[in-house]
Image (cartoon, rainbow, N blue to C red):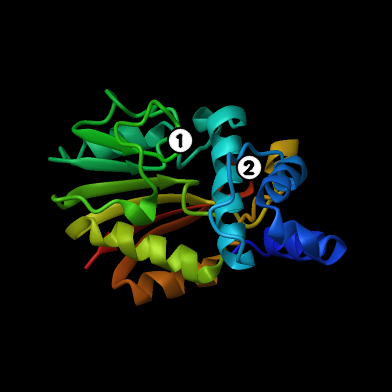
Amino acid sequence: MNLKILNELDRILKNNPSLKANTHAYCQVVNGVFDIELNKIDDTEIHALAEQIDRAVLKNYFGKVWQAETKKFKYSGLAIIDEVNAMNPDNVIDIGCGYNEFKGKIKNLVGIDPYNDRADISVHTLDYKPDVEYDVAICLGSINFGSSDKILGELENVVGMVKSGGFLYFRVNPGIQHDKPAAKWINFYDWDPVFISNAAQYLKCDVLTLRQDDNNRFYFVLRKK
């Protein structure tokens, strides 16, 4: 749950509780406060609405504002291309692929993303249930939003997509807020090495590499047992 959005909704309703009875007016206030473009409110229950707004905020930022900076990263940038190709993988999945930059550069890759039209499949991480197991999963900055429960749920789903003995590449953000105005309401999860180690143990994976990458990010590689 995005507490920033939830707390702001609580403030809005305390100042104007009658909004819940007028969903059109409520929707316009929500659009104005969070700088999104909802056509309607699906559910006025505050937790459900916070989830709807959270997805709209992420879609707005990562679909219209965010730009990839893959070349800036020492470990989790272009170096991954040669490393993954050296494995001669049968299939690779790029989770939250953004502009799908690795397409055509990494063998047998499919990119999924809920916000970018260049993805091969438009789907949220938690909603994707493939009918194959992958040799490699790449998750560069895509599992980074929401609570620990949400992060663990997404990690568990991604690990479930990978074969036993398969590899998972991650770049994660230790809670650093992006400076664009459209990122104001995004809840960036504050990853740290202890959480990474604990999550790997919980998910029955070995941590092969854990490094400080450029731009104050963490880079790590897991192998599924």
Q: Earlier in the sequence, mark 1 or mark 2?
A: 1
* 49 relative position to 136: left or right: right
- Tell me the residue at 38%/69% (across/down): 200
The N terminus - image quarter = bottom right
* 101 relative position to 11: left or right: left
| Residue 67 seen anywhere in this rendered image of the structure | no
Q: Between residues 92 and 125, which one lies in front from this camera angle?
A: 125
Q: CA distance from mark 1 to mark 2?
A: 12 Å
Residue 26 rendering spot, x and y as whole percentages: 71, 50
The label shown at residue 215 is 2
Badge 1 amino acid: Gly
Q: Between residues 42 and 118, which one lies in front from this camera angle?
A: 42
The C terminus - image quarter = bottom left
Q: Secondary structure at mark 2?
A: helix
Q: Secondary structure at mark 1?
A: loop
* 142 relative position to 179: left or right: left
Residue 162 rendering spot, x and y as whole percentages: 22, 56
The label shown at residue 77 is 1
Q: Mark 2: few, some, or many residues within 10 Å (few <14, many ≥20)? A: few
Residue 40 rendering spot, x and y as whole percentages: 58, 45
